[in-house]
Image: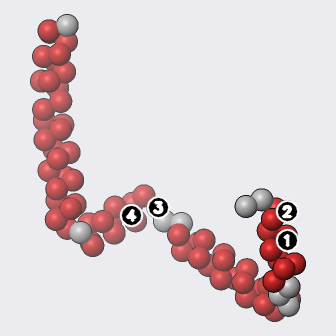
């Protein structure tokens, strides 16, 4: 949606000044609520899905442990 379409939508709805303020407040509150840091998302993952988080940690550890030997092998065979 571009600015012209947004302006057209406003004129179609024709909100009053108070309604427009309320709509703007709701939109900005929704946008600010969606802004989360990466750390907050990871903490939410750990809090909401501990098994998934444990799985991610386990897979990461296995990857870190197996990547150097596999890379060495690939370079040796090249």
Quadrant of the image containing the N terminus = bottom right
**Whole-number angstrom distance, CA of label 1 to CA of label 3:** 34 Å
- For the residues carrying marks 2 and 3, which lies nearer the camera in this image? 2
Residue drawn 73% across the image and 80% down it: 24
In the rendered structure, which disc, 4 or 2, sits on the residue that comes first in sequence?
A: 2
Element carrying mark 2: helix
In the rendered structure, which disc, 4 or 1, sits on the residue that comes first in sequence?
A: 1
Q: Are marks 1 and 2 in contact (CB under 8 Å)?
A: yes
**Whole-number angstrom distance, CA of label 2 to CA of label 3:** 32 Å
Element carrying mark 1: helix
**Whole-number angstrom distance, CA of label 4 to CA of label 2:** 35 Å
Residue drawn 30% across the image and 65% down it: 45
Badge 2 is on which residue? 4
Residue 8 disc label: 1
Residue 39 lies, in percent from the top left, at 39, 60
Residue 42 lies, in percent from the top left, at 34, 61
The quadrant where residue 53 appears: bottom left
- For the residues carrying marks 1 and 3, which lies nearer the camera in this image? 1
Badge 3 is on which residue? 37
Q: Are marks 4 and 1 in contact (CB under 8 Å)?
A: no
Residue drawn 19% across the image and 21% down it: 71
In the rendered structure, which disc, 1 or 3, sits on the residue that comes first in sequence?
A: 1
- Nearer to me, 5 or 62: 5
Residue drawn 85% across the image and 70% down it: 7
**Whole-number angstrom distance, CA of label 1 to CA of label 2:** 6 Å
- Left or right of 44 in this view: 78: left
Above or below, 4 relative to 58: below
Element carrying mark 3: loop
Residue 57 lies, in percent from the top left, at 19, 52
Badge 4 is on which residue? 41
Q: Are marks 4 and 3 in contact (CB under 8 Å)?
A: yes
């Amino acid at each position: 949606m571009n600015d012209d379409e947004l302006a057209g939508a406003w004129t179609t709805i024709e909100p009053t000044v108070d309604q427009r303020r309320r709509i703007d407040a709701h939109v900005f509150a929704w946008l600010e609520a969606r802004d989360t840091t990466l750390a907050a998302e990871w903490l939410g993952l750990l809090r909401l899905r501990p098994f998934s988080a444990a799985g991610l940690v386990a897979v990461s550890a296995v990857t870190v442990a197996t990547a150097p030997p596999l890379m060495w092998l690939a370079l040796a065979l090249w």
